[in-house]
Image (tube, rainbow, N blue to C red):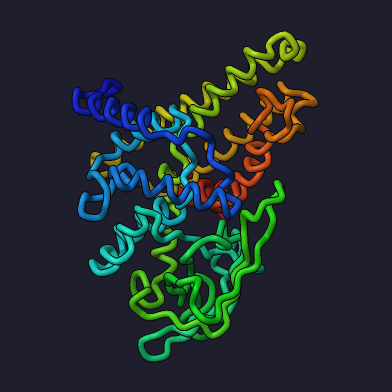
Amino acid sequence: MELTYTPKQKAFRAEVRAWLADNLPREPLASYDTREGFEQHRAWEAKLFESRWSMVMWPADLGGRGCDLIEWLIFEEEYYGAGAPMRVNQNGQLLLGPTLMEFGTAEQKQRFLPRMAASADMWAQGWSEPNAGSDMAAITSKAVLEGEHYVINGQKTWSTRAIFADWLFGLFRSEPGSARHHGLSFLMVPLNAPGVSIRPIKALNGKDAFAEVFFDDVRVPVANRIGAEGQGWHVAMATAGFERGLLLRSPARFQHTARKLVELYKANRESADRDPGLRDAVLETWMGAEAYALSAYHTVGRLSRGEAIGAESSINKIIWSELDLKMHETAMRILGARAELLGTAPVAGDAAGWLEGFLFAQSGPIYAGTNEIQRNIIAERMLGLPK
């Protein structure tokens, strides 16, 4: 693996760094799990799009720059290194976008992708149902074909930011009498369609981060289906690969957190060193973040040679979710009683933000497929162990 950058890549890094220095918001944006913060992040996404920084890997005619994966990793390093705002349209840009690139028609790509890159359309994900979480094949929400429309009835739950989103993509059972992963279709549903109702679900931090979505005779054009009728499982597995792999959680995100953790330890070293295991825990998580980054570059090298990454994305998902949890648990140990302070507390100081991150990190081993399920996938598909 070549670990040096070309002159072109170095110039690209300098361009990204300069643009961010000139354009970053002067003040931190509000949480995107609030209406105010959601709209602030949406405006920031539009600014990124105007300069074609929103989705650098996408083709120029779809709003991107046509960058390769190495340049994307460079962009992410500079973006998180500058402390830029979290990306609010990840469900669309990083999950549905690549799915459309692979399975969408030319008309679908032109219709949806530029607006997605600009965050003119914000997307929620419709996988989970009350009785179909990690076992996604248990989906029961129905989409009955009537002429040129599907008529949808059912419910989705734990849909991230669906309360603020414009569209939802997800799986629906479109073949009567089908079971498990057969007879599912992958549909894109406008959330302002008649028959759609949305009920917010509060997260651990009390914000409306999630929602459950109800469908009562919702009519969706067949043109909104991605892939063939009844082949939704195949399409969704590609989307799940994007979710568990590099795109949703780039290494730079965790390297940034690891650097902040090192600074937190240094600022509180006198008290932290009373716990003899804390120094090692900080070092371990920093090394973990660096190892994950090197692994990502290795994976990108394989992809650039035409190799495919399948079940290995499950390893990736376990690494980043458990690394994030370990980093925030370590921060809580360093802060002691101050770890309980909200970021808005006047005396929060260097504790600000760590509690919010700790609460969110609890969900990492659950979303994108629970880590127990990922370990089963690794055991069966990679190691050849019996079920």
Task: Give the residue at the far front of this rendering.
Answer: 26
Residue occupying image coordinates x 59% and y 45%: 31
Which picture quadrant has residue 4?
A: top left
Question: As rendered, which of 53 and 323 lies closer to the eye?
Answer: 53
Q: Nearer the viewer, residue 114 or 41?
A: 41
Residue 223 in picture, x, y percent from top left: 33, 77
Residue that extends furthest to the bottom in the rendered view of this protein: 147
Q: Residue at x 46, y 80 (%)?
A: 174
The answer to whether one can see residue 186 in this image is: no
Q: Position of residue 365 (x, y in %)?
A: 61, 45
Where is 304 relative to 180, above or below?
above
With 152 as the anchor, is 120 left or right in this view? Answer: left
Residue 263 drawn at (x, y percent) = 58, 17
> In terms of image quadrants, where is residue 332?
top right
User: Quick one: quadrant of the N terminus?
Assistant: top left
Residue in the image at 43% along x and 28% along y: 82
Please identify the residue farthest to the top as the structure is shown: 270
